[in-house]
Image (cartoon, rainbow, N blue to C red):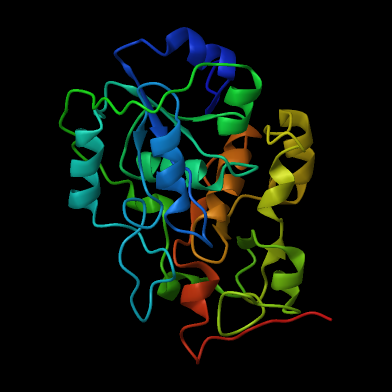
Amino acid sequence: MAGDSNLVTVEWLARHLADPDVVVVDCRFDLARPEAGRTAYRRAHIPGAGYLDLEEDLSGPRQPHGGRHPLPDIAAFSRTLGGLGVDHDVTVVAYDDQQGGMAAARCWWMLRYLGHPRPRVLDGGWSAWCRAGCPTTADVRPRPARTFAPRVRAGLAVGMEEIRRRLGRPDVRLVDSRAPERYRGEVEPLDPVAGHIPGAMNLPWTDTHDERGLMRPADELRARFAALRGGGGEVIVYCGSGVTACANLLAMDEAGLPGAVLYPGGWSDWCSYPENPVAREG
């Protein structure tokens, strides 16, 4: 772990795996097969890792509004973190097996949102760990519980009404993190309406990492986010439901562009209100 990076390497984690103040969290999840991540965890995981489920732990129950992955109840999630041995004194390292680490990035963002000072993501995730020949186990050995006291940083998230009030303001830049064809409104496999929030630019989250699933170098990330640098104002990032946007937020922070905020409800929340405007291209 170098400097203020949000990432740790496989080599760093292997050296610190036995450190009592390092807590590893497995966040593997498959949107098409919700049980697949937990099943994979039970089959094999990084020794000592606990498990956080994207939909049961890192999200709350779906409602008519609020998006497909609304933020979880803070008190309940804090109890879950404490049960995994997390408090404000440990370093938390999250990983998953998605190329680019979308669920691990959601965990990273949730911890930051709750005021945790040292959330990290394993660069390259489960695949990089296995490629390096590092140890895995099926043993589940709970860590001693700690008390996690949330210190919510409300300024890291905005809601739908705030987005609506900001539409058209030159000092607000919206970033849509979804695939280009979804942004353009050509296809929409998950939500009832296709398109994007008017005025948003498209920076797909998948461009933040290379073919091995490793975060791209900082200079490449800075070039990618060049349009967002300078000029002041606010950068608001969204995706379909507040998960993959976290990968963009992680990359922005690595690129030296801190301060961007998340619209957790994302497109799935925005399009649940028929009166909200929709933009399409092509």
Please tell me which residue lies in front, 33 or 238.
33
Residue 175 in sight from this viewpoint: yes
Which residue is drawn at the image coordinates 18% and 37% (left, top)?
Answer: 149
Image position, residue 19 (x, y; %):
35, 10
Above or below residue 264? Residue 16 is: above
Q: Would you identify the image quadrant in which residue 142 lies?
A: top left
Farthest right residue in view: 282
The residue closer to the viewer here, 44 or 64, is 44
Q: Residue furthest bottom?
A: 275
Count numbered badges in the picture: 0
- Tell me the residue at 40%/21% (across/down): 47
119 sits left or right of 20 in the view: right
Q: Is residue 91 left or right of residue 136?
A: left
How far from the left and from the top, in percent, is residue 136?
47, 22
The C terminus lies in quadrant: bottom right
Tell me which residue sits at (33%, 46%) in the image. 153
Examine the image and state in which quarter residue 202 appears: bottom right
Whole-percent x and y of residue 168?
62, 75
Q: 184 above or below 228?
A: below
From the viewer's side, name the closer residue of 40 and 106.
40
Seen from the viewer's position, the closer of residues 155 and 210 is 210
Res. 165 visible in picture: no
Q: Is residue 63 above or below residue 229?
A: below
* Residue 136 placement, left or right of 63: right
Which residue appears at 67% of the width and 72% of the height? 199
Residue 72, percent from left and from top: 30, 57
